[in-house]
Image (cartoon, rainbow, N blue to C red):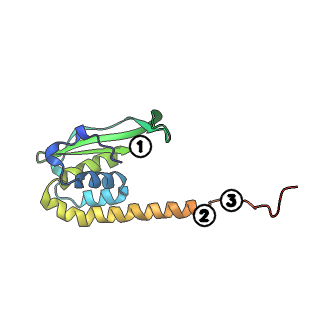
Amino acid sequence: MSMTPRSAVPEHCSTEGGRREWMGVLARAPIDLLRSAFDGSRQRHLARRLVGPEVGLLQLRAKAPVTGTPFHLGEATMTRCVVEIDGRRGYAVVLGRDPERAELAAFFDALLQDPQSRALLASELLQPAEDAIMARRCRKAEEAQKTTAHFFTAARQGSAP
C-alpha cells in the first residue's frame, strides 16, 4: 500500500506505475544503504528542500470484514519531505519519526525520475534495497514461526454415553 496520496504525485512523473514501487522501496530501505548511496552521489549538492522533513500523524482506516463498513483504526506517526533537483520534485512519506530517511527517500525519488539516473540507481540502490527488505521479512517470518502454537483436538472414539 502506497503512503503517498495520488494528489501528491504529479501526473507527468508517473512512469508506468514504477514510481509507486520505487517510492515504497525507498521508504523501507535500510538507512545505511540510503546514506552510502547519498554520500556517493555527485548530485547531492543540487538538492533543495521544499517541504520538511516534518513529522505528523496519519489516520489509519480499515473496513469490517463482513459488512465492509469503514472505521477509524487509529493514528500512526509519519514523516514527510519534498526535495527538488533540477526541476524534478521528489516526495517521501515514511512511517515513524525519521526525518533523515524521509529526506534521503525524497532525494532519490527526484533522481529516479531522470531516465539516465534511474538505470544506474536501479542496480546500485533499488535492487540491494529490495534484497535487504526481503531478507528482513524472511528473518521476521522465521522468528514468528518459532513461536507458533499448534493446537489440535482429539476426536472422541465411539458414541457418547
Q: Are marks 3 and 1 in contact (CB under 8 Å)?
A: no
Residue shown at 79% from the left, 61% from the top: 156
Q: What element carries label 2?
A: helix
Q: Where is residue 65 in the image (x, y as percent from the top left)?
A: 49, 42
Mark 1 burial class by Cα count in 10 Å: few <14, some 14-19, many 20+: some
Residue bearing mark 2 = 146
How far from the left and from the top, in percent, is residue 131?
A: 36, 65
Density class for disc 3 (Cα within 10 Å; few <14, some 14-19, many ≥20) is: few
Residue 33 vs residue 60: left or right? Answer: left
Label pair 2/3, CB-CB below 8 angstroms = no
Question: Is 23 located above or below residue 53 in the figure?
Answer: below
- Amino acid type shown at disc 1: Gly
Question: In x, y percent, where is residue 98?
Answer: 38, 45
Query: Relative to residue 63, is residue 55 drawn left or right?
Result: left
Could you tell me if the residues under marks 1 and 2 are in contact, i.e. CB atoms within 8 Å? no
| Residue 45, placed above or below residue 143 | above
- Spatial CA span between label 2 and label 3: 15 Å
Q: Name the residue under label 1.
A: 96
- The three-letter code of the residue at mark 2 reads Lys
Closer to the eye: label 1 or 2: 2
Front label number (2 vs 3):
3
In primary-sequence order, the first of circles 1 and 2 is 1
Q: Is mark 1 on a helix, strand or loop?
A: loop
Determine which of the numbered discs, if any, sits on residue 111 in the image: none
Q: Which residue is drawn at 65% across and 59% down?
A: 149
Tell me which residue sits at (32%, 55%) in the image. Answer: 25
Query: Residue 151 bears which disc, if any?
Result: 3
Q: Is residue 119 left or right of residue 144?
A: left
